[in-house]
Amino acid sequence: MSDKKLPLPPTLPPSIITSDNFCLFHKGDLSEDIYTCPKCKTIYCLECAKKAQADRKPCIKCKQIVLL
């Protein structure tokens, strides 16, 4: 057998963000003004939702078009 050390396995991010104060668009805390996806009820910052609508980006979780 070889004495060669194996690299550490990669650290993966959690698959589900459990915080109610987390915006998936900018990956940070929610601002005071929020947008809720009508289909899956995921919460985003209102400014992030406006930018997502302008950039034609869908909801991260359910892929519903952002409608304001």
Image (cartoon, helix red, strand yellow):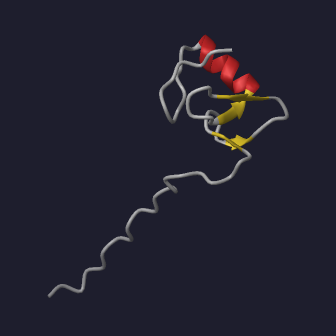
State the image coordinates of residue 29 (x, y, percent, origin top left). Answer: 75, 43
Left or right: residue 4 compared with residue 10: left
Residue sitting farthest toward the left: 1
Pick whichever, 63 or 5, lies toward us: 63
Residue sitting farthest toward the front: 39
State the image coordinates of residue 19 (x, y, percent, origin top left). Answer: 68, 52
Quadrant in the picture for the N terminus: bottom left
| Residue 25 versus residue 13 in the image, above or below | above
Left or right: residue 44 compared with residue 59: right
Q: How many marks?
A: 0
Seen at 74% across and 46% down, the residue is 21
| Residue 22 versus residue 63 in the image, above or below | below
Seen at 62% across and 26% down, the residue is 38
Quarter of the view holding residue 37: top right
Left or right: residue 56 compared with residue 5: right
State the image coordinates of residue 20 (x, y, percent, origin top left). Answer: 71, 48
Quadrant in the picture for the C terminus: top right
Seen at 81% across and 35% down, the residue is 31
Quarter of the view holding residue 30: top right
Seen at 61% across and 38% down, the residue is 24
| Residue 51 versus residue 18 in the image, above or below | above
